[in-house]
């Protein structure tokens, strides 16, 4: 069987459960259904039902709206030929289906109230969010529905996100824009079906793809209102900051972290307008029809990104798909170079790392170059789910905040919070815990930061960041851990240090367990300074920053207490000594939660012998001992050695606090042993 045809055969078997599915097809004529590859099994684009000339012709007419004039002419010719039945005789590669129970066509017929025939599409093999796409047509070839099929956890989550986004937009669609209606969203045969109304398209309504629909983009941005805030302090940028830790390749993570740090240093202080975006607005996800813009593929909708991201994404996709040219924003002339935002590492990423070996801008690749490009993609597949968090794994993007808020009741709340400390090994431990089938991380990034800096958004907003309970249980079933209850968790290094966060947690999450990871306070302070310096939140050298710390922190606790919405830059980013005085923070946690609900581990112990530390945590959580494939230390930053005199002075500064910590825990911390 062809490697490319294999997934198509598996898809047909899923859509016709219990049937005998054959490839190459049975030529005896005894098959109940015959599907033919267009153009062939070596380069499959569609599976067309044999003997249904009208259906095949209609599917070809609707296939890919964004085409050149030459491609449209070829498509029209193909559709005309299909009406004669000629392709049914010339398309030699086929899949045959015999017997079986009720098929997807039967189920769609029940949903739509009429008989339908499906044409099957399957996205490119290199796409992490590849899933079956069905064009449901009547036997006479009239469009009945457009169907997305979620056949794994990631694609089911994407489909659910799109359904919620479309329901959210149903009563607030911008003027001049039409989006699909959700006709059905539910489970069938272990898969999820999202049945959408077909959007009318017409070649007569086509406009040059260079004319980006800026007015419609601006209208969409304001559907939930616009807000102005500083880039570096926004929730959007917090998501971007968490991206490097999500990557399984340390070298790639380091390069991306350097880019993010540079952007933040240069532009972090900018006040920007934030609004909604479609998330994947491209010429091939839209069509003009009778003066109305039809817009589909809403899996990546998000309510709060810097204004203009849809235009940046549109221009970037256009210029990478075609030779470089000016992209007009509804007017004439060259708009100049791409805006700086075009190089931002957007949270709504495509599906993994950037493609390699692609054509140079302004130059059409040769057939040899295209073959080499495809080979490179096969050798460098997209990031797998095991190597990245939920919002980057397979889908490239997790559930959006708005979608999560709308479906909060069906989502989990954390049973475990990693509360700190910053630069204390929390990312390494978080990634190890996230490998456990019963521990479920947030959809977006490792830390939501609700209880410290986002508390004003409300619990529905917070709960919306976590996966659905049903999805978490299916993950456990797939791992063979029936009977084990999943536990959602997140990691936010500021929770332990923020003066209001612990009490908020105690009030809102009764029964939650806390995990605090501590590290040599001298090393932590030095590492934190380097971290904040690289992020652009610090400008002074380490010793000078320590001298300034009392002045910087003066009155900040009082301001936070007086105004819970107040965000203290100094307290969050420049409290090097204060954050390293652990005993004061652990005493608060013990008082509020009790010793039985607070776990304290030392980073030095975890990095030296991770297995016993990891097992101790699992035992406290009541979970089976399932280890990750490998324990890794992440987020280490190279830095110059600390002067011996300064180290000795800091060591003496922290000594009394460490002694109190040892008395409190009944254990001497490893840096004092």
Image (cartoon, helix red, strand yellow):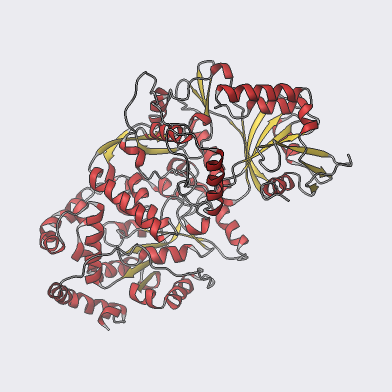
Going by the image, does 47 lie left or right of 576? right
Going by the image, does 36 lie left or right of 568? right
Say which of 248 and 164 sits in front.
248
Tell me: residue 579, above or below residue 405: below
Q: What's the residue at 25%, 38% (across, down)?
A: 271
x and y percentages locating residue 564 in the rendered image = 25, 49
x and y percentages locating residue 672 in the rendered image = 25, 81
Residue furthest bottom in the image: 673
x and y percentages locating residue 33 in the rendered image = 81, 38
Which quadrant: the C terminus?
A: bottom left
Say which of 371 and 299 sits in front.
371
Tell me: residue 77, above or below residue 265: above
Q: Is residue 449 visible?
A: no
Q: What's the residue at 48%, 21% (across, down)?
A: 208
Going by the image, does 163 lie left or right of 76? left
Going by the image, does 253 lie left or right of 466? left
Q: Is residue 629 visible?
A: yes
Res 576 → quadrant: bottom left
Say which of 270 and 573 sits in front.
270
Say which of 210 and 145 sits in front.
210
x and y percentages locating residue 360 in the rendered image = 43, 38
Mark count: 0
């Amino acid at each position: 069987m062809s490697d490319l045809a294999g997934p198509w055969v598996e898809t047909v078997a899923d859509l016709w459960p219990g049937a005998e599915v054959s490839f190459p097809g049975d030529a005896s004529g005894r098959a109940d259904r015959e599907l033919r590859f267009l153009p062939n099994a070596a380069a499959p684009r569609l599976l067309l039902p044999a003997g249904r000339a009208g259906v095949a012709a209609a599917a070809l007419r609707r296939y890919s709206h964004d085409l050149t004039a030459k491609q449209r002419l070829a498509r029209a010719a193909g559709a005309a030929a299909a009406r004669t039945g000629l392709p049914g005789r010339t398309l030699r590669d086929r899949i045959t289906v015999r017997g079986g129970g009720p098929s997807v066509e039967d189920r769609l017929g029940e949903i739509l109230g009429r008989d339908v025939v499906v044409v099957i599409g399957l996205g490119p093999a290199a796409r992490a969010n590849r899933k079956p796409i069905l064009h449901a047509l009547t036997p006479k070839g009239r469009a009945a529905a457009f169907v997305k099929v979620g056949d794994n956890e990631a694609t089911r989550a994407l489909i659910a996100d799109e359904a919620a986004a479309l329901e959210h937009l149903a009563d607030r669609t911008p003027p001049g824009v039409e989006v699909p209606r959700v006709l059905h969203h539910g489970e069938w045969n272990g898969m999820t079906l999202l049945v959408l109304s077909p959007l009318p398209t017409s070649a007569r309504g086509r406009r040059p793809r260079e004319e980006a629909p800026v007015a419609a983009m601006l209208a969409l941005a304001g559907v939930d209102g616009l807000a102005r805030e500083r880039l570096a302090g926004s929730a959007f940028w917090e998501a971007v900051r968490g991206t490097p830790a999500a990557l399984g390749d340390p070298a790639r993570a380091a390069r991306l972290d350097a880019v993010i740090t540079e952007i933040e240093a240069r532009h972090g202080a900018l006040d920007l307008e934030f609004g909604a975006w479609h998330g994947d607005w491209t010429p091939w996800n839209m069509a003009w029809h009778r003066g109305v813009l039809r817009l589909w593929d809403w899996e990546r909708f998000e309510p709060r990104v810097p204004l203009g991201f849809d235009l940046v994404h549109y221009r970037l996709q256009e210029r990478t798909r075609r030779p470089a040219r000016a992209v007009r924003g509804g007017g004439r002339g060259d708009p100049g170079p791409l805006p700086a935002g075009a190089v931002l590492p957007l949270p709504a990423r495509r599906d993994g790392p950037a493609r390699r070996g692609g054509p140079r801008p302004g130059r059409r690749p040769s057939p040899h170059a295209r073959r080499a490009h495809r080979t490179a993609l096969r050798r460098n597949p997209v990031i797998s789910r095991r190597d990245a968090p939920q919002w980057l794994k397979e889908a490239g993007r997790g559930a959006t905040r708005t979608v999560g808020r709308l479906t909060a009741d069906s989502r989990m709340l954390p049973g475990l919070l990693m509360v700190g400390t910053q630069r204390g090994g929390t990312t390494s431990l978080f990634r190890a815990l996230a490998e456990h089938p019963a521990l479920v991380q947030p959809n977006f990034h490792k830390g939501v930061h609700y209880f410290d800096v986002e508390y004003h958004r409300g619990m529905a907003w917070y709960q919306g960041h976590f996966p659905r309970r049903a999805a978490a249980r299916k993950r456990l079933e797939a791992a063979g851990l029936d009977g084990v209850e999943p536990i959602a968790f997140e990691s936010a290094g500021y929770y332990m240090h923020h003066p209001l966060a612990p009490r908020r947690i105690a009030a809102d999450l009764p029964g939650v367990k806390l995990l605090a990871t501590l590290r040599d306070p001298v090393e932590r302070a030095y590492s934190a300074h380097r971290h904040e310096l690289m992020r652009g939140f610090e400008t002074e050298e380490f010793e000078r920053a320590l001298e300034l710390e009392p002045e910087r922190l003066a009155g900040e606790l009082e301001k936070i207490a007086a105004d819970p919405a107040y965000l203290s830059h100094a307290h969050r980013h420049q409290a090097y000594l204060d954050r390293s005085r652990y005993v004061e923070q652990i005493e608060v946690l013990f008082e509020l939660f009790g010793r039985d609900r607070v776990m304290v581990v030392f980073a030095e112990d975890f990095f030296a012998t991770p297995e016993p530390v990891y097992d101790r945590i699992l035992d406290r959580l009541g979970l089976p001992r399932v280890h990750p494939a490998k324990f890794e230390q992440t987020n280490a930053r190279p830095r110059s050695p600390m002067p011996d005199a300064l180290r000795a002075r800091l060591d003496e500064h922290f000594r009394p606090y460490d002694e109190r910590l040892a008395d409190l825990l009944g254990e001497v911390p490893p840096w004092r042993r």
